Image (spheres, grey):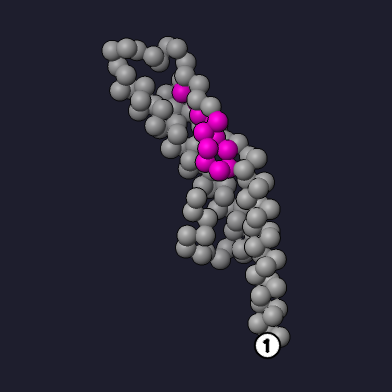
């Protein structure tokens, strides 16, 4: 029974550490660009897009599809960077333990 109590306490401590890391991650931001910096996306650790900056030179009414592709590419790059940061930080808390669905938003 002592082992179970000890394990439960460790789980509670880990859960508290994870909540703290999640809050810290929410405050972090990443920037990602596409088109050689023509489109820039800033997002936070909750994968919320904070801003999108578009260089006027890339706005071509005859090629809207290219601009759409650049925006998608920058958004995906930002999301990927956030996922890497979250995985690294949570891995520190969990000691690399992988729990499916634990960090899904």
**At 41% across and 27% down in the image, what residue appears?**
71
Q: Nearer the viewer, residue 104 or 80?
A: 104
Magenta region, residue range: 39-50
Residue 91 image offset from top left, x and y in percent: 59, 58
Tell whether 59 sits left or right of 102: left
Tell whether 76 sits left or right of 16: left
**At 32% across and 19% down in the image, what residue appears?**
64
Tell whether 38 sits left or right of 12: left
**At 48% across and 40% down in the image, what residue appears?**
79
Label 1 SS: loop
> Around disc 1, counting alpha carbons within 10 Å, would you say few (fewer than 14), some (14 to 19), or many (20 or more)?
few
Q: Does residue 19 lie above or below 50 as drawn?
A: below
Q: Does residue 23 lie above or below 65 as drawn?
A: below
For the question of whether residue 68 can be seen, the reply is yes
- Is residue 98 part of the magenta span, yes or no? no
Question: On the image, numbered disc 1 is attached to which residue?
Answer: 1
Examine the residues drawn in magenta and state their main secondary structure.
strand
For the question of whether residue 37 can be seen, the reply is no
Q: Quadrant where the N terminus lies? A: bottom right
Which residue extends farthest left? Answer: 62
Residue 5 image offset from top left, x and y in percent: 69, 80
Residue 11 image offset from top left, x and y in percent: 65, 70
**At 50% across and 29% down in the image, what residue appears?**
41
> How many numbered circles are shown?
1
Q: Nearer the viewer, residue 56 or 5?
A: 5
Q: Quadrant of residue 8?
A: bottom right
Which residue extends farthest bottom? Answer: 1
Residue 94 image offset from top left, x and y in percent: 61, 63
- Is residue 40 part of the magenta span, yes or no? yes
């Amino acid at each position: 029974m002592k082992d179970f109590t000890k394990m439960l306490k460790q789980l509670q401590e880990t859960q508290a550490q994870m909540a703290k890391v999640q809050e810290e991650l929410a405050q972090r931001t990443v920037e990602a660009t596409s088109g050689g910096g023509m489109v820039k996306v800033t997002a936070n650790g909750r994968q919320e897009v904070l801003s999108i900056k578009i260089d006027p030179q890339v706005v071509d009414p005859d090629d809207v599809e290219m601009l759409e592709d650049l925006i998608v590419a920058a958004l995906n790059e930002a999301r990927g960077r956030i996922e890497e940061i979250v995985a690294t930080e949570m891995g520190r808390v969990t000691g690399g333990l992988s729990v499916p669905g634990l960090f899904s938003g």
